[in-house]
Structure formats: C-alpha cells, structure tokens
C-alpha cells in the first residue's frame, strides 16, 4: 500500500465532485481526503485527492480520473516536488489549570487560539498531514470535543510544473 | 421555437432516422414536436428495449442510436439497456423527460434522479437547465458518444425546458470541449517498438476485440494479418470481424471459447490485443497471458491498458489509425510453421459433442443455419447457452454478429434485431434466443408488427434457464433451483396472436428444409427449435 496525492483540474460545473466521488466508491478505491475549490481561472476547479492503494490501483485511479469527460488534467503531486497543507480546527475542553499548557503546545506548533470559552478553546492549526496528526497525538491527555479537518490541498513547487490551461 | 422543437432540429442535424421510445407526460412536448419531422418514431413495449433497439441501429450504422423515454419509471426502466450499451462501448444518445425544473429534488410524481442513477453506466450525462443550451449539449452528446471509446450519453430534460422559448437556434459546427480530447494517433516510438517485436516473433497472434469493429478497422487489421501471415483469434465481441472460415482465423478465446484458440494465445510469443479489455471471461488463464511473451495492448481507452493485464508495450489510440501506421513500416515475417502448428492444434483439440438424436443438436443446427444465411446477414445472439452455442458454431461470412458481451443482458437479441433490421432493411437479420430470453422480450413482437419490420426469430427451447442449470449441474450436483421454465406459453399460439408464421424443428433430420422455409419466409416468422433440456455447452 502506498499513498499518493493527485491534483485534478476539472471543469467548474455542477456535478463534477459527485462524478469524481462516485468513481472512487464504485470502483472500490480508497479516498483519504478530497478538497476542492475554484482556480485562478474561474472556469476550472482544482481538486486535491489523497488516495492509498497498491501501485496498480493508484495507476488505475489516475487513468480513470483522466477518463472523466469533465477532467482536464490529472497529475501526481509527488512529496519531493510539492507543498501540501491541511487546516484543522480542534475544540478542546480545558480546565483553568490546563489552559497554559494547551497554549504552550499550540505555540510550539505555530497554531492559533481562535475562540476562547469558559470551558473550552478552539485551536487552528495548519500544516502537513503528519504535523496535524502529531499535534492531535499531543492532546492525548485532554478531551477533544470536536475536530474538523479540511483535507490536504497541494501545489507543485517551482515554475516548471505549472499546468497552464487553454 | 421551443426547447422540444430545438431537440428535434438537433436530431435532424445529426442525421438521426429513428427514435425508439415510450412516451409519458414528461417527454410529451418532444413527442409532439417530432411529429413535424421525418424522423421515424418507434414505440417499443418496454423502455429497456428502446435502448437495445437503438444499440442495433448504432452497431450497423456507426452512428449513435437514439431513444427517448419519460421521467421516473420510464427513465429507470431504460437503465439496463444503457448499462448493456456501456459494457460493449455502443454509442447511444438517450433522452429522458424530467419533472419541471422548479420541482427537481422534491420527490414529486414520476421524479427520478436519473443522471445520478446512471452515473456509472454512461460516458457522460447532462441535466438541461436552460433551453438555449440544447444545441450545444446535443452537439457535444453526439460527439462524446461516438468518439474515443464509444458509449451512451444521457440527456435529462425537464418538462418546462422542453416548453421554454429558445432565443435563437443555431446548431454548432464543431464542439469545443476543453477537457475531452481522445487520443487518436498512436505514439510513433511505440509503433516502432511493436514492429521491432513483431520482426523477432516466431509465434505471434492477433486477438481481435469488439474495438476493431467499433473503430472501423476490420479491413486494415485483416490486411495487416494477411500480408504478414499472422494468425488471429477473437473475443466474443470480436466475432464477425473476420470471416469464420478465414484460414488465419483460429476461433474465439475465453472460458467458453475454443480450446485451440486459448492454446494459441497462451503459447504465443508476441500477443497483439486489439480493442479488447482482457476481461475475465475472455481470458481463460490470465497468468499465461503475460508469461514468457510480449503483450502489446492496443486500445483507444488508456484506462483499459494495464487494468487486467500488464502489457509490455501499451499503445493508446484509434486502432484503424494505428494499423494504418503499422502497415507503413517495413516488416518481414514468416509465421508459416506457427500457423501449421495451430492447424494441428485445431484438429487435435476439436470438441466432439455427443448429441441426443431425439432433439436438435445446436452445433448441427447453427452450422446449417449460418451456411444458408446471406453473406452479409446479421446474426443477433441472445444470452444463455444459446449465446455460447452461437459463438461456437455460427459461420459468419461478411455479415455481422451482435450480442450483449460485457453485460450479458438476457432479452437483447429481439429488440437489437429490430433496430438492425430497421437500419438495414435490405439485409437478412436473424435473432437467436433461448426460451428464457425470449420471454424477456416477447412483448416486442407487437413492435415488429406495428411498424412493419420483418422479424426472423429462432427460439431454442430446452424448458430451462440452461446456462444456470448447467452451472447448478456442475457446482451443485444437479440440485436445480429456480431454473425450470414450466408454464411457458405455447409458442405457436402465442405468435399466431401477432400474425407471425410459426415453424418448429424437432430433430436434425428436417433442419435444412425448415431452415430454408424460415429464411425464405416473407412474413414475420418464429422458428422453435427443440433442444435437449440436459444439453451442456461444456
């Protein structure tokens, strides 16, 4: 099993995300995260998909995605040539004596406290998948009330791999 | 002009001659407008068969077949027909009526989310939101259906959009699809590699799939094989691409194919798979397919290459284009020893049947029937034991062999034959089905009668769902479950209600006489052939 990050440039029309998602479910492919948003050119959406499987399955995923009529380009965002980011919002229950400790952990991870209530905090943290996983791990002794993760978004590094669109 | 009239104009612009379908209120504006057109409408008796009939048209005209049904149950009923076309890459344009736009999503009467429901069985689908988009959408739909790897496209059109005013009707000359550009031309470096491997090959073989006919590459592929003396086998969908009795043709492969065809494919050193998916049924031993050989996989769909078998040389493109390029290369080959060996295998590995003389032997019957059929006739095989017998024994000359290969949809043959006959009235079209598959489509006898389309239907009657019975025979030691067709109608009485002639064949003795009578009959005719209920394809 390996994990790959695919970047899909698709027509920004209704139903595109459902077509992509249904492709994964009906062919039994794993989807670890999917994020989508409009690109600088409003005719297109950029969809970042993190998927895992055997190398054969991942090759099929790439081909089947490319086969979708609405999809313009599918490329793999290889870790060495790409930047990945994910954002997470974590709502943690805190007692007054725990508060300082949580703030310290958040600072180490360059997170932000974005909401403070008498009994809980919301922390915003951005980073690669493993950074967020590690942060959550460190909160082990605390009670996480709610967790929202956006899934990975990514771009290739440098100017060489920019996909120009017609 | 309203949306419905615009749809008809689009179909006219595409040269559509027939629309198969079944109306309901949600598609009524369209059926009202089509009355003013020369396009012929054919009322089938259930929606699934509209898609099969359109498939018959598509396969004989190389243009998308068209059907139009209503919303809700009309749309859901046609799904099996769409899935059947999708599995065999048959181009269709399916129009479905839909409830009013403002009611979409509110579960009103006869509303079904058909674009959602068919997502995995269509190449593409549209839900029309604006009547002004109709010309562009139809232009795109016909193009998508009939280019690259062909397949069905569905257009769902709400009732209010069919009635909405279209500002200006202009049918586009060309499509402008930013995201869809199928690869046509094969990569020239890969083509050179293919030639290099073929030049070294001692035991090459070409396996012809359905893509060869879909890509109109029959002649170029055959010319190439003949020029270099390369033997050929076919998949089920490839039957009829080359004449059955061609000296370089070594039969159909697969677990229901000829043993010598499988042996030929497995022992080859260079295997050219052309327009074939390498699907489970077509390959008896997938591991042997890659072992000790160069596998060259030619397909217009890049996703098929490497899906079921890892190829040594993948070659994406239109197979006609690729074989035209291959033919331009210098290549000297001598496969005469290999062809000699294959002919030996053909003699040694011939399956000898032991037919029960009290019934008609399918081998004897199908051989005799297809020998008597016209050179350019169309043989439409259904699904079941009858399909396996048809594949094994039909002698196709310059005609066509149509069947539901990928989906294996029972009841395909009768409506598909109807479409084929309508598209090519001058050609002899014969549907061959079993008593199970016949009863799945027998309502269409009325369609033949209503529209004066000549029907020639053969029913293999063995009083069983034979293919499943055979499976239960081997797997469950004759523990038969839900395969007995007792209660089936008396076919003579049944077809007489539709003014069909009726013929019956009880044993091999009268075969030639009855076959002649059947083929010469100018009326609609059904021939019932009595098969041993215990007969097996293996």
Image (cartoon, rainbow, N blue to C red):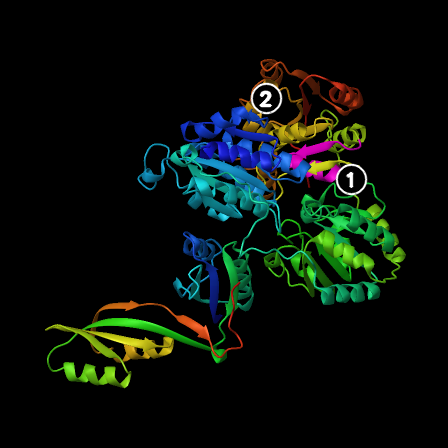
Instruction: Tell me which chain the residue with mark 2 is part of.
Output: B
Q: Could you tell me residue A8's position as x and y percent?
A: 48, 64
Q: Could you tell me residue B240's position as x and y percent?
A: 74, 40
Q: Select label 2 or label 1 by which is in front.
A: 2
Instruction: Using residue B325 as the reference point, say whether residue B146 is left or right of it.
Output: left
Is A93 rendered above or below residue B452?
below
Please rate how many residues cluster around mark 2, counting C-alpha atoms within 10 Å: few if below 14, some from 14 to 19, many from 20: many
Q: Residue at x 75, y 43 (%)?
A: B241
In which quadrant is the C terminus of chain B drawn? top right
Is B498 rendered above or below residue A74?
above
Depth check, front residue: B458 or B257: B458
Q: Residue at x 51, y 72 (%)?
A: A162
Instruction: Using residue B101 as the reference point, say whether residue B360 is left or right of it.
Output: right
Is A165 rendered above or below residue B262?
below
- Estimate the spatial distance between the alpha carbons at disc 2 and disc 1, rounded to whole Å: 36 Å
Instruction: Using residue B329 as the reference point, say whether residue A45 is left or right of it.
Output: left
Instruction: List the residue tagged with mark 1.
Output: B352
Instruction: Tell me which chain the residue with mark 1 is part of.
Output: B
Residue B383 lies in the magenta stretch: yes
| Label 2 secondary element | helix
Depth check, front residue: B81 or A139: B81
Tell me which label, 2 or 1, sits earlier in the chain: 1
Specify start and end residues of the magenta stretch as a single range: B375-393
Residue B389 lies in the magenta stretch: yes
| Label 1 secondary element | loop
Instruction: List the residue tagged with mark 2.
Output: B445
């Amino acid at each position: 099993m390996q994990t790959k990050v695919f970047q899909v440039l698709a027509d920004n029309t209704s139903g595109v995300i459902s077509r992509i998602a249904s492709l994964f479910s009906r062919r039994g492919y794993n989807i670890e995260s999917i994020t989508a948003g409009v690109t600088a050119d409003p005719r297109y959406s950029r969809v970042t998909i993190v998927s895992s499987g055997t190398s054969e399955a991942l090759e099929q995923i790439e081909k089947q995605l490319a086969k979708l009529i609405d999809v313009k380009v599918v490329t793999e965002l290889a870790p060495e040539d790409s930047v990945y980011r994910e954002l997470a919002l974590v709502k943690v229950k805190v007692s007054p004596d725990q508060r300082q400790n949580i703030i310290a952990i958040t600072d180490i991870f360059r997170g932000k406290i974005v909401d403070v209530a008498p009994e809980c905090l919301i922390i915003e943290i951005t980073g690669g998948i493993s950074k967020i996983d590690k942060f959550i791990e460190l909160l082990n002794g605390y009670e996480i009330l709610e967790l929202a993760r956006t899934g990975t978004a990514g771009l290739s590094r440098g100017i060489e791999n920019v996909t120009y669109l017609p | 002009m309203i949306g419905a009239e615009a749809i008809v104009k689009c179909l006219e612009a595409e040269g559509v001659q027939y629309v198969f379908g079944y109306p309901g209120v949600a598609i009524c504006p369209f059926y009202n407008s089509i009355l003013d057109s020369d396009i012929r409408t054919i009322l089938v008796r259930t929606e699934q068969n509209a898609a099969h009939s359109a498939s018959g048209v598509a396969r004989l005209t190389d243009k998308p077949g068209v059907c139009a049904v209503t919303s809700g149950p009309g749309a859901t009923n046609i799904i099996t027909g769409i899935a059947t076309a999708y599995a065999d890459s048959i181009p269709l344009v399916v129009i479905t009526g839909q409830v009013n736009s403002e009611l979409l999503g509110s579960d009103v009467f006869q509303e079904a989310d058909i674009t959602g429901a068919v997502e995995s069985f269509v190449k593409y689908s549209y839900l029309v939101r604006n009547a002004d988009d109709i010309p562009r959408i139809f232009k795109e739909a016909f193009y998508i259906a009939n280019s690259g790897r062909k397949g069905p496209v569905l257009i769902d059109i709400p009732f209010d959009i069919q009635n909405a005013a279209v500002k200006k009707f202009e049918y586009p000359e060309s499509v402008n699809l930013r995201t869809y550009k199928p690869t046509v031309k094969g990569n020239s470096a890969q083509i050179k590699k293919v030639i290099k491997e073929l030049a070294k090959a001692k035991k090459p073989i070409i396996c012809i799939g359905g893509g060869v006919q879909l890509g109109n590459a029959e002649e170029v592929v055959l010319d190439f094989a003949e020029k270099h003396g390369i033997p050929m086998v076919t998949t089920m969908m490839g039957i009829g691409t080359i004449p059955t009795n061609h000296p370089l043709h070594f039969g159909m492969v697969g677990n229901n194919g000829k043993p010598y065809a499988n042996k030929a494919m497995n022992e080859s050193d260079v295997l050219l798979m052309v327009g074939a998916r390498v699907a489970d049924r077509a390959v008896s031993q997938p591991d042997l397919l890659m072992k000790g050989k160069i596998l060259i996989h030619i397909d217009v769909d890049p996703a098929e290459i490497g899906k079921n078998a890892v190829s040594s040389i993948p070659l994406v493109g239109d197979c006609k284009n690729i074989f035209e390029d291959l033919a331009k290369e210098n290549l000297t080959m001598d496969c005469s020893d290999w062809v000699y060996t294959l002919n030996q295998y053909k003699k040694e590995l011939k399956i000898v049947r032991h037919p029960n003389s009290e019934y008609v032997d399918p081998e004897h019957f199908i051989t005799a029937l297809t020998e008597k059929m016209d050179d350019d006739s169309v043989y439409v095989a259904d699904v079941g034991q009858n399909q396996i017998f048809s594949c094994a024994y039909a002698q196709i000359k310059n005609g066509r062999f149509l069947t539901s290969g990928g989906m294996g949809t029972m009841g395909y043959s009768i409506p598909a034959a109807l479409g084929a006959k309508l598209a090519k009235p001058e050609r002899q079209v014969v549907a061959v089905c079993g008593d199970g598959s016949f009863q799945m489509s027998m309502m269409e006898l009325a369609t033949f009668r209503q529209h004066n389309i000549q029907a020639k239907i053969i029913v293999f009657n063995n009083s069983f769902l034979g293919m499943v019975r055979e499976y239960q025979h081997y797997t469950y030691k004759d523990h038969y479950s839900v395969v007995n067709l007792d209660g089936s109608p008396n076919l003579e009485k049944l077809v007489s209600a539709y003014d069909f002639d009726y013929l019956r064949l009880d044993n091999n003795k009268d075969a030639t006489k009855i076959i002649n009578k059947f083929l010469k009959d100018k009326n609609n005719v059904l021939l019932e052939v009595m098969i041993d209920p215990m007969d097996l394809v293996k």
